[in-house]
Image: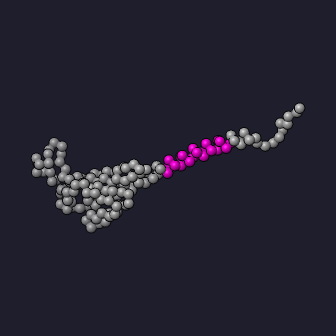
């Protein structure tokens, strides 16, 4: 009996192997796209939090030294913050925390020196969520009495 080997076409095994290779390639590509999208969203959220923190910090720094009140953990939720008559937007999903305190060197205590009212330390912390994880951006600046 003579077998015919010259038939053209693909066998079922060739098609199955090709489909498996294509599916593996597509799954690797889809995982890459997912990770790129996730990382892009994280960077976007962090950039927005940094922008909000910078705006709040700069609005405090633009005031005169005596016009900056001492603030302890002032929470700013969704909406707008008004500092010195200037609205600062805080987007949905972001929460800002502002603290203004007199700077005290580590070698002194808060009551030991009358010079504690020369520098104010402003701390702005903006919290946000990415992929059900809470993250934060914290910026600090100092304002000196002139």
Residue placed furthest toward the right: 1
Could you say where residue 40 lies in the image, as x and y percent from the top left? 46, 51
**Nearer to me, 8 or 85:** 8
Q: Residue at x 16, y 42 (%)?
A: 107
Q: Is residue 23 within the magenta segment? A: yes
Q: Main secondary structure of the magenta part?
A: helix
Could you say where residue 139 lies in the image, as x and y percent from the top left? 30, 51
Q: Residue at x 41, y 50 (%)?
A: 132
Position of residue 99 relative to residue 9, above or below, is below
Display coloring: one colour
Range covered by the magenta-colored residues: 18-37
**Nearer to me, 44 or 8:** 8
65 left or right of 24? left
How many numbered circles are shown? 0
Position of residue 5 relative to residue 82, above or below, is above
125 left or right of 44? left
Residue 57 visible somewhere in the drawing: no
Position of residue 18 relative to residue 116, above or below, is above
Residue placed furthest toward the top: 1
Residue 5 visible somewhere in the drawing: yes
Q: Is residue 136 within the magenta segment? A: no
Quadrant where the C terminus is found in the figure: bottom left
Could you say where residue 21 lies in the image, as x and y percent from the top left? 64, 41
Quadrant where the N terminus is found in the figure: top right
Q: Residue at x 50, y 47 (%)?
A: 35
Could you say where residue 24 lies in the image, as x and y percent from the top left? 61, 42
Q: Residue at x 10, y 51 (%)?
A: 114
């Amino acid at each position: 009996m003579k077998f015919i080997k010259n038939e053209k076409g693909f066998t079922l095994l060739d098609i199955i192997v090709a489909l498996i290779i294509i599916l593996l390639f597509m799954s690797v590509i889809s995982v890459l796209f997912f990770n790129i999208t996730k990382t892009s969203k994280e960077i976007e959220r962090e950039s927005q939090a940094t922008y909000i923190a910078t705006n709040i910090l700069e609005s405090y720094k633009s005031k005169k030294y005596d016009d900056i009140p001492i603030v302890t953990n002032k929470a700013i939720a969704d909406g707008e913050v008004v500092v010195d008559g200037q609205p600062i937007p805080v987007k949905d999903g972001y929460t800002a925390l502002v603290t203004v305190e007199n700077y005290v060197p580590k070698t002194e205590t808060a009551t030991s020196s009358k010079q504690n009212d020369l520098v104010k330390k402003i701390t702005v912390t903006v919290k946000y969520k990415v992929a059900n994880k809470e993250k934060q951006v914290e910026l600090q600046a100092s304002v000196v009495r002139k």
